[in-house]
Amino acid sequence: MFSKEPLNDNMLVQQFMDGSQSAIEELVNRHKNRVYTYIVLIVKNNQLAEDIFQDTFIKVIRSLKLGKYTENGKFVSWVLRIAHNLIIDHFRKEKLLSTTSNDDSEFDLFNSQKFSDENIEDRLVYDQITADVRKLVDELPDDQKQVIVMRHYMGLSFKEIADQTDVSINTALGRMRYALINLRKLIEKNNLQLTKI
């Protein structure tokens, strides 16, 4: 009788646990862009992001089948936490190698249609600024880098950041404060001009 009303995430989770394959497909389709964007923003490599994205949803499906999901928060926050843990696992395995990449040719976060009308000079300046900022963000401690990515690239609230990282809102705010202080120091140290002249 309420067929026009879209099912919320928890209803779809319940349907999947009751045997509905289409329910999990709906959940994946609903959240795939946000989850993939989150992963690629951190790992900065399309192929690696694809692998972690697939591993994330394999783990989501396994966890749901084992009854490991409880409705104590938003489904997407739970999925992002799984993705985050898989990213951390990947970087732990790669610890002996360099884990940061300055290769901007793999994936440009700001390579979007909405910038295509800018002239070439503006675009080059913008690309240089964003590349410089990205390199500085990479120099931050992991917990500070994480809160910057979640807040400024993903647009999450501090409550969502706190939920996903299993810390209090005050801790999340503190990490952001220190991240911004450290970024300011790095900008001054590197003498970067972050605005168009």
Image (cartoon, rainbow, N blue to C red):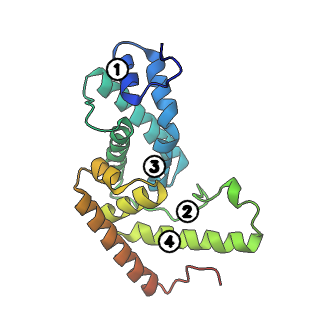
Callout 1: helix, strand or loop? helix
Give the image quarter of residue 131: bottom right
- Work out whether residue 137 can be spotted: yes
Question: In the rendered image, which quarter contains the C terminus?
Answer: bottom right
Q: Nearer the viewer, mark 3 or mark 1?
A: 1
Residue 75 % position (x, y): 36, 35
The residue indicated by pointer 3 is 38
The residue indicated by pointer 2 is 103
Amino acid type, callout 1? Gln
The crowd level at tag 4 (other Cα within 10 Å; few <14, some 14-19, many 20+) is: some
Q: Earlier in the sequence, mark 1 or mark 4?
A: 1
Marks 2 and 3, how far apart in space? 18 Å
Please report the residue visible at 23 percent of the width from the left and 62 percent of the height from the top.
Answer: 170
Residue 128 % position (x, y): 61, 73
Q: Is residue 50 left or right of residue 57?
A: right
Q: Earlier in the sequence, mark 3 or mark 1?
A: 1
As drawn, the label of residue 63 is none
The crowd level at tag 2 (other Cα within 10 Å; few <14, some 14-19, many 20+) is: few
Please report the residue visible at 52 percent of the width from the left and 31 percent of the height from the top.
Answer: 29
Marks 2 and 1, how far apart in space? 42 Å
Marks 2 and 4, how far apart in space? 14 Å
The residue indicated by pointer 4 is 133
The residue indicated by pointer 1 is 14
Q: Earlier in the sequence, mark 3 or mark 4?
A: 3
